[in-house]
Image (cartoon, rainbow, N blue to C red):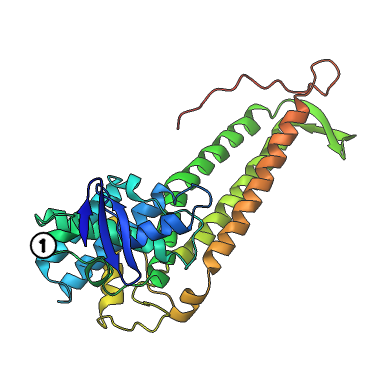
Amino acid sequence: MSSTGQFRIEKDTLGEVKVPAYAYYGSQTQRAADNFQISGITLPRSFIRAQGIIKASAAQANMKLGELPDNIGRVIVQAAEEVIEGKWDHQFIVDVYQAGAGTSQNMNVNEIIGNRATELLGSSLDPSANDFRVHPHNHVNMSQSTNDTFPSALHIATVENISEQLLPAIERLVKELNVKSEEFNSIIKSGRTHLHDAVPMKLGQEFAGYTDTIRFVYENIKASLDPFYEIGLGGNAIGTVINTHPDYPQTVIQEINSRINYPFRQPVEMFSFMQNRNAALRMMSVLKELAVHLIKITSDLRLLSSGPRTGLAEISLPPFSLVQP
């Protein structure tokens, strides 16, 4: 293994790989970037953050259990926290469409953290320097597999995104719709079925229907979020918890909960977690329901505001403005 100009040459079981000299990622990431030139889209910031949380928590757990030397574990935690903060987002170069159940993405974060931790120990990224290196698999990925960390990162990212962004946004929408339903309660208009005149109704009643529709979906999203608190860390490759300390699964989840203050827990059935993405499928269905209702409401408003001379022109929509939360 040697360095050549703007590149360094890394060697793995498949042979030599040319990697940019500045890169914190290594041979596995470079191979994936070369092999999966599909969309040019990488995984989002929230997922990368979740990967950093898992790697930092795993290192903390392995140190507590005596599996990982403290001097190595501490620099892994420091490097992982830099990943959490977004410092190395530009180093995550693997396409979102990748084969292998996310193995390339898992190795991308392992290599970044391993090389950054190596640097924090005072060693060079140049593989020819013969310095001590923090190994991306043996150290950073200790007690882990793509098969348990990738879906766990998906769950963590989902919980954070929905709890901190989507649900508050829906709460604000429900509140504003309710305000409008009260404000418009004295306005009489025509009710319609299939665009034909039906019976008189209040515009406030129409908005009350919108309010309760979105409130109902809000409650369904909250209920669908609960299965995401199950994360199968420690299941390793297929759920057998092989090659891990017997206390690792519970310890690593405790570390995650103390780090981001959510009630994550072990799966009721580890093999089910490893085999299926039931929580994601359920949430996808509820989010589709939300999208359908939002399209229906906006289509109603567009129709009611059509005109002003040859359309319905029952309401007048004000010019768009970005409302800050």
Q: Which residue is mark 1?
A: 131
Q: Residue at x 82, y 24 (%)?
A: 312
Closer to us: 258 or 7 = 7
Residue 265, picture quadrant = bottom left
Query: x, y (%) of residue 275?
Result: 51, 76
* Left or right for 197, reference 124: right
Closer to us: 170 or 249 = 249
**Rendered-image quadrant of the N terminus:** bottom left
Q: From this view, report whether residue 136 is shown above or below residue 67.
A: above
Query: x, y (%) of residue 67?
Result: 17, 76
Q: Residues within 10 Å of mark 1 (few under 14, many from 20)?
A: some
Residue 73, picture quadrant = bottom left
Query: x, y (%) of residue 79?
Result: 21, 54
Q: Residue at x 9, y 54 (%)?
A: 122
Q: Secondary structure at mark 1?
A: loop
Closer to us: 213 or 306 = 306
